[in-house]
Amino acid sequence: EVDWFSLASIIFLLMFAPLIVYYFIMSCDQYQCSLVSPLVDLLLGNMRLLDIWDKTPPLTYKAAGIYALWVTLQVILYAFVPDFCHKFLPGYVGGVQEGAVTPAGVVNKYEINGLQAWIITHVLWFANAYYFHWFSPTIIFDNWIPLLWCANILGYVVSTFAMIKGYFFPTNAKDCKFTGNFFYDYMMGIEFNPRIGKWFDFKLFFNGRPGIVAWTLINLSYAAKQQELYGQVTNSMILVNVLQGIYVLDFFWNEAWYLKTIDICHDHFGWYLGWGDCVWLPYLYTLQGLYLVYHPVQLGTANAVGILILGLVGYYIFRVTNHQKDLFRRTSGNCKIWGKKPEYIECSYMSVDGTKYYSKLMTSGFWGWARHFNYTGDLMGSLAYCLACGFAHVLPYFYIVYMAILLTHRCIRDEHRCFSKYGKDWKRYTTKVPYRLLPGVF
Ligand code: NDP
Protein backbone atom coordinates (compact mmCIF):
# COMPACT_ATOMS: atom_id res chain seq x y z
CA GLU A 1 0.00 0.00 0.00
CA VAL A 2 1.16 3.51 -0.79
CA ASP A 3 0.68 5.90 2.13
CA TRP A 4 -0.16 9.55 1.46
CA PHE A 5 3.24 10.83 2.60
CA SER A 6 5.13 8.57 0.16
CA LEU A 7 2.74 9.54 -2.61
CA ALA A 8 3.11 13.27 -1.90
CA SER A 9 6.92 12.95 -1.81
CA ILE A 10 6.90 11.03 -5.08
CA ILE A 11 4.73 13.55 -6.89
CA PHE A 12 6.87 16.37 -5.49
CA LEU A 13 10.07 14.71 -6.74
CA LEU A 14 8.62 13.87 -10.17
CA MET A 15 7.61 17.50 -10.58
CA PHE A 16 10.54 19.28 -9.00
CA ALA A 17 13.68 17.10 -9.17
CA PRO A 18 14.41 18.07 -12.82
CA LEU A 19 13.84 21.74 -11.88
CA ILE A 20 16.17 21.43 -8.88
CA VAL A 21 18.95 20.09 -11.12
CA TYR A 22 18.30 22.86 -13.66
CA TYR A 23 18.29 25.52 -10.93
CA PHE A 24 21.70 24.45 -9.58
CA ILE A 25 23.36 24.28 -12.98
CA MET A 26 21.73 27.52 -14.18
CA SER A 27 22.86 29.30 -10.97
CA CYS A 28 26.45 28.46 -11.82
CA ASP A 29 26.05 29.35 -15.49
CA GLN A 30 24.29 32.67 -14.97
CA TYR A 31 24.92 33.68 -11.33
CA GLN A 32 28.43 32.43 -10.45
CA CYS A 33 26.95 29.58 -8.36
CA SER A 34 24.88 31.85 -6.10
CA LEU A 35 21.65 30.06 -5.20
CA VAL A 36 20.09 33.20 -3.73
CA SER A 37 20.73 35.75 -6.52
CA PRO A 38 18.32 34.23 -9.08
CA LEU A 39 15.53 34.28 -6.46
CA VAL A 40 16.33 37.87 -5.45
CA ASP A 41 16.36 38.94 -9.11
CA LEU A 42 13.01 37.26 -9.70
CA LEU A 43 11.44 38.68 -6.53
CA LEU A 44 12.66 42.23 -7.23
CA GLY A 45 11.44 42.00 -10.81
CA ASN A 46 14.96 42.48 -12.28
CA MET A 47 14.46 39.26 -14.19
CA ARG A 48 11.53 37.21 -15.42
CA LEU A 49 11.59 33.43 -15.61
CA LEU A 50 11.53 33.83 -19.37
CA ASP A 51 14.71 35.95 -19.30
CA ILE A 52 16.54 33.21 -17.39
CA TRP A 53 15.20 30.60 -19.78
CA ASP A 54 16.24 32.69 -22.82
CA LYS A 55 19.82 32.84 -21.53
CA THR A 56 19.91 29.04 -21.04
CA PRO A 57 21.84 27.19 -23.77
CA PRO A 58 19.48 24.95 -25.79
CA LEU A 59 19.90 21.34 -26.91
CA THR A 60 22.44 21.26 -29.75
CA TYR A 61 23.33 18.71 -32.42
CA LYS A 62 26.87 18.73 -31.07
CA ALA A 63 25.74 17.78 -27.54
CA ALA A 64 23.36 15.14 -28.91
CA GLY A 65 26.25 13.66 -30.92
CA ILE A 66 28.62 13.67 -27.93
CA TYR A 67 26.00 12.08 -25.68
CA ALA A 68 25.01 9.43 -28.24
CA LEU A 69 28.68 8.49 -28.74
CA TRP A 70 29.23 8.38 -24.99
CA VAL A 71 26.27 6.10 -24.27
CA THR A 72 27.10 3.88 -27.27
CA LEU A 73 30.70 3.48 -26.06
CA GLN A 74 29.47 2.50 -22.60
CA VAL A 75 26.92 0.03 -24.01
CA ILE A 76 29.66 -1.59 -26.13
CA LEU A 77 32.07 -1.80 -23.18
CA TYR A 78 29.34 -3.23 -20.96
CA ALA A 79 27.65 -5.69 -23.30
CA PHE A 80 30.33 -6.77 -25.75
CA VAL A 81 33.69 -6.74 -23.94
CA PRO A 82 33.86 -9.58 -21.38
CA ASP A 83 35.98 -8.85 -18.34
CA PHE A 84 39.68 -9.35 -18.68
CA CYS A 85 40.87 -7.54 -15.54
CA HIS A 86 40.10 -10.41 -13.14
CA LYS A 87 42.57 -12.57 -15.09
CA PHE A 88 45.57 -10.47 -14.10
CA LEU A 89 44.58 -8.20 -11.17
CA PRO A 90 45.14 -10.08 -7.88
CA GLY A 91 42.20 -9.76 -5.49
CA TYR A 92 39.84 -8.27 -8.06
CA VAL A 93 36.51 -10.11 -8.49
CA GLY A 94 35.21 -9.70 -12.04
CA GLY A 95 33.73 -11.75 -14.86
CA VAL A 96 30.48 -13.67 -14.38
CA GLN A 97 29.15 -13.30 -10.82
CA GLU A 98 25.89 -14.19 -9.09
CA GLY A 99 23.54 -11.67 -7.48
CA ALA A 100 21.46 -12.28 -4.34
CA VAL A 101 18.28 -14.39 -4.28
CA THR A 102 15.34 -12.27 -5.51
CA PRO A 103 11.96 -12.37 -3.70
CA ALA A 104 10.79 -14.87 -6.33
CA GLY A 105 13.81 -17.05 -5.58
CA VAL A 106 15.78 -16.26 -8.77
CA VAL A 107 19.58 -15.89 -8.74
CA ASN A 108 20.71 -13.63 -11.61
CA LYS A 109 24.12 -13.79 -13.22
CA TYR A 110 25.99 -10.57 -14.04
CA GLU A 111 29.04 -9.81 -16.20
CA ILE A 112 31.18 -7.67 -13.89
CA ASN A 113 33.36 -5.56 -16.18
CA GLY A 114 32.95 -2.03 -14.81
CA LEU A 115 36.58 -1.59 -13.78
CA GLN A 116 37.66 -2.51 -17.29
CA ALA A 117 35.13 -0.07 -18.81
CA TRP A 118 36.37 2.67 -16.46
CA ILE A 119 40.03 2.02 -17.33
CA ILE A 120 39.43 1.90 -21.11
CA THR A 121 37.33 5.08 -21.00
CA HIS A 122 39.98 6.95 -18.99
CA VAL A 123 42.87 5.68 -21.13
CA LEU A 124 40.98 7.01 -24.18
CA TRP A 125 40.40 10.31 -22.36
CA PHE A 126 44.07 10.80 -21.49
CA ALA A 127 45.23 9.55 -24.92
CA ASN A 128 43.03 12.23 -26.46
CA ALA A 129 44.14 14.95 -24.02
CA TYR A 130 47.87 14.35 -24.41
CA TYR A 131 48.26 12.75 -27.85
CA PHE A 132 45.37 12.70 -30.34
CA HIS A 133 43.67 16.05 -29.54
CA TRP A 134 40.41 14.99 -31.22
CA PHE A 135 38.46 17.13 -28.77
CA SER A 136 39.24 19.56 -25.96
CA PRO A 137 39.35 18.09 -22.40
CA THR A 138 36.98 20.91 -21.44
CA ILE A 139 34.33 19.42 -23.78
CA ILE A 140 32.06 18.29 -20.93
CA PHE A 141 32.13 21.64 -19.14
CA ASP A 142 31.70 23.55 -22.43
CA ASN A 143 28.53 21.59 -23.31
CA TRP A 144 27.25 21.05 -19.79
CA ILE A 145 23.73 22.47 -20.19
CA PRO A 146 23.06 21.07 -23.71
CA LEU A 147 24.21 17.70 -22.33
CA LEU A 148 21.73 18.12 -19.46
CA TRP A 149 18.87 18.01 -21.97
CA CYS A 150 20.29 14.84 -23.53
CA ALA A 151 20.67 13.17 -20.12
CA ASN A 152 17.06 14.08 -19.28
CA ILE A 153 15.80 12.59 -22.53
CA LEU A 154 17.64 9.33 -21.85
CA GLY A 155 16.48 9.29 -18.21
CA TYR A 156 12.80 9.69 -19.15
CA VAL A 157 12.98 7.29 -22.11
CA VAL A 158 14.58 4.57 -19.99
CA SER A 159 12.16 4.98 -17.07
CA THR A 160 9.11 5.00 -19.36
CA PHE A 161 10.41 2.01 -21.28
CA ALA A 162 11.00 0.16 -18.00
CA MET A 163 7.39 0.84 -16.94
CA ILE A 164 5.94 -0.38 -20.25
CA LYS A 165 8.23 -3.40 -20.20
CA GLY A 166 7.09 -4.22 -16.65
CA TYR A 167 3.48 -4.39 -17.86
CA PHE A 168 3.91 -6.10 -21.22
CA PHE A 169 7.13 -8.10 -21.39
CA PRO A 170 8.81 -8.40 -17.99
CA THR A 171 12.04 -10.35 -17.65
CA ASN A 172 10.65 -12.20 -14.65
CA ALA A 173 6.92 -11.71 -14.03
CA LYS A 174 7.14 -13.11 -10.48
CA ASP A 175 9.59 -10.39 -9.47
CA CYS A 176 7.32 -7.53 -10.56
CA LYS A 177 5.63 -5.27 -8.01
CA PHE A 178 2.38 -3.47 -8.90
CA THR A 179 0.93 -1.17 -6.28
CA GLY A 180 -1.83 0.04 -8.60
CA ASN A 181 -0.69 3.61 -8.08
CA PHE A 182 0.64 4.98 -11.37
CA PHE A 183 2.98 7.59 -9.86
CA TYR A 184 4.45 5.19 -7.31
CA ASP A 185 4.99 2.46 -9.90
CA TYR A 186 6.60 4.90 -12.33
CA MET A 187 8.91 6.31 -9.69
CA MET A 188 9.88 3.21 -7.72
CA GLY A 189 9.65 0.76 -10.61
CA ILE A 190 7.72 -2.38 -11.40
CA GLU A 191 10.36 -4.82 -12.55
CA PHE A 192 13.00 -5.93 -10.12
CA ASN A 193 15.74 -6.76 -12.60
CA PRO A 194 14.71 -5.65 -16.10
CA ARG A 195 17.01 -7.04 -18.76
CA ILE A 196 17.33 -7.08 -22.52
CA GLY A 197 18.56 -10.46 -23.61
CA LYS A 198 20.47 -12.55 -21.15
CA TRP A 199 23.07 -10.02 -20.05
CA PHE A 200 21.99 -6.39 -20.50
CA ASP A 201 20.92 -5.59 -16.95
CA PHE A 202 19.35 -2.12 -16.60
CA LYS A 203 20.25 -1.58 -12.96
CA LEU A 204 23.91 -2.52 -13.25
CA PHE A 205 24.35 -0.61 -16.50
CA PHE A 206 22.58 2.62 -15.64
CA ASN A 207 23.89 2.99 -12.13
CA GLY A 208 27.47 2.25 -13.04
CA ARG A 209 28.14 3.37 -16.57
CA PRO A 210 26.59 6.61 -17.81
CA GLY A 211 26.60 7.89 -14.22
CA ILE A 212 29.61 6.71 -12.25
CA VAL A 213 32.15 6.27 -15.10
CA ALA A 214 31.22 9.81 -16.13
CA TRP A 215 31.77 11.20 -12.60
CA THR A 216 35.59 11.17 -12.79
CA LEU A 217 35.60 12.37 -16.42
CA ILE A 218 33.37 15.31 -15.49
CA ASN A 219 35.76 16.25 -12.69
CA LEU A 220 38.73 16.01 -15.08
CA SER A 221 36.92 18.30 -17.49
CA TYR A 222 36.40 20.83 -14.68
CA ALA A 223 40.11 20.66 -13.80
CA ALA A 224 40.98 21.24 -17.47
CA LYS A 225 38.67 24.27 -17.51
CA GLN A 226 40.41 25.74 -14.46
CA GLN A 227 43.73 25.27 -16.24
CA GLU A 228 42.38 26.99 -19.35
CA LEU A 229 40.83 29.92 -17.45
CA TYR A 230 43.43 30.56 -14.74
CA GLY A 231 46.59 28.85 -15.99
CA GLN A 232 46.64 26.50 -12.99
CA VAL A 233 44.63 23.83 -11.19
CA THR A 234 43.96 24.69 -7.52
CA ASN A 235 44.70 22.28 -4.68
CA SER A 236 40.96 22.19 -3.81
CA MET A 237 40.20 20.94 -7.34
CA ILE A 238 42.91 18.31 -7.01
CA LEU A 239 41.46 17.24 -3.63
CA VAL A 240 37.96 16.89 -5.08
CA ASN A 241 39.31 14.95 -8.06
CA VAL A 242 41.39 12.64 -5.86
CA LEU A 243 38.80 11.97 -3.12
CA GLN A 244 35.91 11.43 -5.52
CA GLY A 245 38.25 9.44 -7.79
CA ILE A 246 38.99 7.05 -4.89
CA TYR A 247 35.25 6.66 -4.27
CA VAL A 248 34.56 5.91 -7.93
CA LEU A 249 37.46 3.47 -8.28
CA ASP A 250 36.36 1.76 -5.08
CA PHE A 251 32.91 1.31 -6.60
CA PHE A 252 34.31 -0.41 -9.68
CA TRP A 253 36.90 -2.45 -7.82
CA ASN A 254 34.04 -3.74 -5.66
CA GLU A 255 31.39 -3.96 -8.38
CA ALA A 256 30.72 -7.61 -7.48
CA TRP A 257 30.01 -6.45 -3.93
CA TYR A 258 27.62 -3.87 -5.33
CA LEU A 259 25.40 -6.79 -6.41
CA LYS A 260 24.67 -7.27 -2.70
CA THR A 261 23.66 -3.66 -1.97
CA ILE A 262 20.13 -2.31 -1.56
CA ASP A 263 20.05 -0.84 -5.11
CA ILE A 264 20.46 -4.25 -6.69
CA CYS A 265 19.01 -6.51 -4.00
CA HIS A 266 15.88 -4.59 -3.04
CA ASP A 267 15.04 -1.61 -5.27
CA HIS A 268 12.92 -2.04 -8.38
CA PHE A 269 13.98 -0.20 -11.54
CA GLY A 270 11.91 2.92 -12.17
CA TRP A 271 12.40 6.66 -12.54
CA TYR A 272 14.21 6.84 -9.19
CA LEU A 273 17.09 4.74 -10.53
CA GLY A 274 16.70 5.38 -14.29
CA TRP A 275 16.41 9.17 -14.32
CA GLY A 276 18.45 9.46 -11.11
CA ASP A 277 21.44 7.65 -12.63
CA CYS A 278 21.31 9.61 -15.90
CA VAL A 279 20.69 13.10 -14.51
CA TRP A 280 20.75 13.51 -10.74
CA LEU A 281 23.99 11.63 -10.12
CA PRO A 282 26.26 13.10 -12.83
CA TYR A 283 24.93 16.64 -12.38
CA LEU A 284 24.58 17.01 -8.63
CA TYR A 285 27.36 14.73 -7.36
CA THR A 286 29.86 16.82 -9.32
CA LEU A 287 28.77 20.25 -8.06
CA GLN A 288 32.00 20.82 -6.10
CA GLY A 289 34.16 20.63 -9.23
CA LEU A 290 31.73 22.85 -11.15
CA TYR A 291 31.78 25.39 -8.33
CA LEU A 292 35.58 25.43 -8.30
CA VAL A 293 35.65 26.40 -11.98
CA TYR A 294 33.77 29.59 -11.07
CA HIS A 295 35.51 30.07 -7.68
CA PRO A 296 39.05 28.66 -7.81
CA VAL A 297 39.75 28.14 -4.09
CA GLN A 298 43.42 27.69 -3.10
CA LEU A 299 43.46 26.14 0.39
CA GLY A 300 46.15 26.71 3.02
CA THR A 301 48.31 23.62 3.62
CA ALA A 302 46.80 22.86 7.06
CA ASN A 303 43.24 23.05 5.71
CA ALA A 304 44.08 20.94 2.68
CA VAL A 305 45.74 18.28 4.85
CA GLY A 306 42.83 18.32 7.34
CA ILE A 307 40.30 17.83 4.55
CA LEU A 308 42.37 15.07 2.99
CA ILE A 309 42.56 13.25 6.34
CA LEU A 310 38.79 13.61 6.92
CA GLY A 311 38.12 12.26 3.42
CA LEU A 312 40.52 9.33 3.80
CA VAL A 313 39.28 8.38 7.30
CA GLY A 314 35.69 8.54 6.02
CA TYR A 315 36.64 6.37 3.08
CA TYR A 316 38.43 3.90 5.38
CA ILE A 317 35.36 3.51 7.62
CA PHE A 318 33.07 3.20 4.57
CA ARG A 319 35.26 0.55 2.94
CA VAL A 320 36.10 -1.51 6.03
CA THR A 321 32.46 -1.58 7.20
CA ASN A 322 31.24 -2.71 3.79
CA HIS A 323 34.08 -5.23 3.56
CA GLN A 324 33.28 -6.68 6.99
CA LYS A 325 29.68 -7.40 6.01
CA ASP A 326 30.67 -8.76 2.63
CA LEU A 327 33.28 -11.10 4.13
CA PHE A 328 30.89 -12.19 6.86
CA ARG A 329 28.10 -12.98 4.41
CA ARG A 330 30.37 -14.66 1.83
CA THR A 331 31.91 -16.99 4.41
CA SER A 332 28.67 -17.44 6.31
CA GLY A 333 30.40 -16.16 9.46
CA ASN A 334 33.46 -18.42 9.13
CA CYS A 335 35.96 -15.57 9.09
CA LYS A 336 37.82 -13.21 11.43
CA ILE A 337 36.66 -9.66 12.13
CA TRP A 338 39.30 -7.62 13.92
CA GLY A 339 41.17 -10.83 14.69
CA LYS A 340 38.23 -12.63 16.30
CA LYS A 341 35.39 -14.91 15.22
CA PRO A 342 32.42 -12.63 14.47
CA GLU A 343 29.40 -12.52 16.75
CA TYR A 344 25.99 -12.67 15.10
CA ILE A 345 22.28 -13.30 15.44
CA GLU A 346 20.75 -16.22 13.55
CA CYS A 347 17.59 -15.27 11.68
CA SER A 348 15.12 -16.69 9.18
CA TYR A 349 12.64 -15.40 6.59
CA MET A 350 10.19 -16.65 3.94
CA SER A 351 10.28 -15.89 0.18
CA VAL A 352 7.00 -15.26 -1.68
CA ASP A 353 6.65 -18.95 -2.63
CA GLY A 354 6.76 -19.90 1.07
CA THR A 355 10.31 -21.31 1.10
CA LYS A 356 12.11 -20.71 4.39
CA TYR A 357 15.65 -19.23 4.22
CA TYR A 358 18.22 -18.67 6.95
CA SER A 359 20.53 -15.70 7.37
CA LYS A 360 22.82 -14.04 9.92
CA LEU A 361 23.13 -10.48 11.20
CA MET A 362 26.62 -9.62 12.41
CA THR A 363 27.01 -7.78 15.72
CA SER A 364 30.78 -7.35 15.83
CA GLY A 365 33.32 -5.11 14.08
CA PHE A 366 31.89 -1.78 12.91
CA TRP A 367 28.49 -3.55 12.71
CA GLY A 368 28.56 -3.78 16.49
CA TRP A 369 29.12 0.00 16.83
CA ALA A 370 26.10 1.05 14.78
CA ARG A 371 23.66 -0.55 12.34
CA HIS A 372 24.86 1.58 9.40
CA PHE A 373 28.37 2.74 10.19
CA ASN A 374 29.16 2.43 6.46
CA TYR A 375 26.81 5.39 5.90
CA THR A 376 28.67 7.35 8.60
CA GLY A 377 31.96 6.88 6.74
CA ASP A 378 30.26 7.87 3.49
CA LEU A 379 28.97 11.05 5.13
CA MET A 380 32.44 11.98 6.43
CA GLY A 381 33.86 11.61 2.91
CA SER A 382 30.99 13.67 1.47
CA LEU A 383 31.66 16.45 3.99
CA ALA A 384 35.33 16.51 2.95
CA TYR A 385 34.44 17.20 -0.72
CA CYS A 386 32.24 20.12 0.34
CA LEU A 387 34.77 21.62 2.78
CA ALA A 388 37.35 21.72 -0.04
CA CYS A 389 35.22 24.50 -1.59
CA GLY A 390 35.52 26.89 1.37
CA PHE A 391 32.59 28.78 2.87
CA ALA A 392 31.75 31.52 0.37
CA HIS A 393 28.62 29.82 -1.04
CA VAL A 394 26.14 27.16 0.04
CA LEU A 395 25.91 25.44 -3.36
CA PRO A 396 28.81 23.00 -2.84
CA TYR A 397 27.24 21.95 0.50
CA PHE A 398 24.17 20.63 -1.26
CA TYR A 399 25.93 17.26 -1.52
CA ILE A 400 26.38 16.68 2.22
CA VAL A 401 22.81 17.85 2.96
CA TYR A 402 21.47 15.57 0.24
CA MET A 403 23.59 12.58 1.34
CA ALA A 404 22.51 13.07 4.97
CA ILE A 405 18.84 13.01 3.91
CA LEU A 406 19.35 10.15 1.44
CA LEU A 407 21.27 7.91 3.83
CA THR A 408 19.06 8.64 6.86
CA HIS A 409 15.98 7.91 4.77
CA ARG A 410 17.67 4.83 3.32
CA CYS A 411 18.57 3.66 6.81
CA ILE A 412 14.95 3.96 7.97
CA ARG A 413 13.61 2.39 4.74
CA ASP A 414 16.07 -0.51 5.06
CA GLU A 415 15.23 -1.10 8.71
CA HIS A 416 11.54 -1.12 7.91
CA ARG A 417 12.20 -3.73 5.22
CA CYS A 418 14.49 -5.79 7.47
CA PHE A 419 11.87 -5.75 10.22
CA SER A 420 9.21 -7.08 7.86
CA LYS A 421 11.69 -9.66 6.59
CA TYR A 422 13.17 -10.92 9.88
CA GLY A 423 10.44 -9.95 12.40
CA LYS A 424 11.42 -10.75 15.98
CA ASP A 425 14.99 -11.64 14.93
CA TRP A 426 15.43 -8.05 13.75
CA LYS A 427 14.15 -6.84 17.14
CA ARG A 428 16.81 -8.95 18.87
CA TYR A 429 19.41 -7.37 16.58
CA THR A 430 18.33 -3.78 17.27
CA THR A 431 18.39 -4.48 21.02
CA LYS A 432 21.96 -5.70 20.71
CA VAL A 433 23.03 -2.83 18.39
CA PRO A 434 20.77 0.07 19.41
CA TYR A 435 22.21 2.94 17.30
CA ARG A 436 21.84 3.58 13.58
CA LEU A 437 24.59 5.95 12.49
CA LEU A 438 26.42 7.42 15.50
CA PRO A 439 26.96 5.32 18.64
CA GLY A 440 25.33 7.05 21.61
CA VAL A 441 23.60 9.70 19.46
CA PHE A 442 21.36 8.32 16.68
P1 NDP B 1 24.15 -1.87 3.28
O1 NDP B 1 25.36 -2.31 2.56
O2 NDP B 1 24.34 -1.40 4.67
O3 NDP B 1 23.13 -3.06 3.20
C1 NDP B 1 22.00 -3.18 4.02
C2 NDP B 1 21.58 -4.63 4.00
O4 NDP B 1 22.59 -5.43 4.64
C3 NDP B 1 20.32 -4.90 4.77
O5 NDP B 1 19.19 -4.71 3.97
C4 NDP B 1 20.49 -6.36 5.17
O6 NDP B 1 20.19 -7.14 3.99
C5 NDP B 1 21.98 -6.48 5.40
N1 NDP B 1 22.39 -6.24 6.76
C6 NDP B 1 21.96 -5.25 7.60
N2 NDP B 1 22.58 -5.35 8.78
C7 NDP B 1 23.40 -6.41 8.70
C8 NDP B 1 24.30 -7.03 9.62
N3 NDP B 1 24.47 -6.58 10.86
N4 NDP B 1 25.00 -8.11 9.22
C9 NDP B 1 24.85 -8.60 7.97
N5 NDP B 1 24.01 -8.07 7.06
C10 NDP B 1 23.31 -6.98 7.42
O7 NDP B 1 23.37 -0.71 2.56
P2 NDP B 1 23.37 -0.10 1.09
O8 NDP B 1 23.22 -1.16 0.10
O9 NDP B 1 22.38 1.00 1.13
O10 NDP B 1 24.78 0.62 0.99
C11 NDP B 1 25.98 0.10 0.49
C12 NDP B 1 27.00 1.23 0.48
O11 NDP B 1 26.72 2.12 -0.59
C13 NDP B 1 27.04 2.04 1.75
O12 NDP B 1 28.35 2.19 2.19
C14 NDP B 1 26.47 3.38 1.36
O13 NDP B 1 27.10 4.41 2.09
C15 NDP B 1 26.76 3.45 -0.13
N6 NDP B 1 25.74 4.22 -0.86
C16 NDP B 1 26.13 5.33 -1.55
C17 NDP B 1 25.21 6.08 -2.24
C18 NDP B 1 25.62 7.28 -3.00
O14 NDP B 1 24.76 7.83 -3.67
N7 NDP B 1 26.85 7.73 -2.93
C19 NDP B 1 23.79 5.71 -2.27
C20 NDP B 1 23.50 4.55 -1.51
C21 NDP B 1 24.44 3.83 -0.85
P3 NDP B 1 19.69 -8.67 4.04
O15 NDP B 1 18.29 -8.61 3.57
O16 NDP B 1 20.61 -9.35 3.08
O17 NDP B 1 19.83 -9.16 5.44
Image: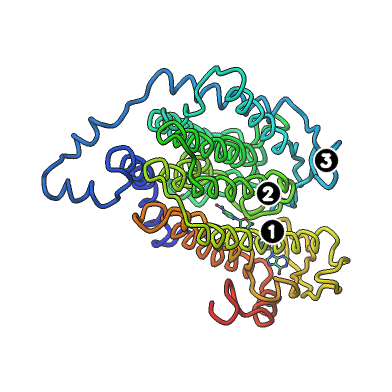
Q: Are marks 3 and 1 in contact (CB under 8 Å)?
A: no
Q: Are marks 1 and 2 in contact (CB under 8 Å)?
A: yes
Residue kind at label 3, given as amino acid type: Leu
- In this view, the residue in front, 132 or 182, is 132
Mark 1 is surrounded, within 10 Å at the Cα level, by few (under 14), some (14 to 19) or many (20 or more) other residues, namely some
- For residue 89, which numbered disc appears in the image? 3
Q: Which residue is mark 1?
A: 319
Q: Residue visible at 40% across and 31% down?
A: 149
| Image location (x, y in percent) of residue 103 | 69, 54
Please identify the quarter of the rendering in which residue 427 is found.
bottom right
Label 1 and label 2: CA atoms lie apart by 8 Å
Residue kind at label 1, given as amino acid type: Arg
Q: Which residue is mark 2?
A: 250
- Left or right: 31 as drawn, with respect to 113: left
Q: Secondary structure at mark 3?
A: loop
Please identify the quarter of the rendering in which residue 414 is found.
bottom right
Q: Residue visible at 64% across and 29% down?
A: 121
**3 or 1: tag closer to the N-terminus:** 3
**2 or 3: tag closer to the N-terminus:** 3
| Image location (x, y in percent) of residue 5 | 40, 62
**1 or 2: tag closer to the N-terminus:** 2
Up the image or down, 78 lies above or below 370; here it is above
Mark 3 is surrounded, within 10 Å at the Cα level, by few (under 14), some (14 to 19) or many (20 or more) other residues, namely few
Q: Secondary structure at mark 2?
A: helix
Q: Residue furthest right?
A: 334
- In this view, the residue in front, 169 or 97, is 97
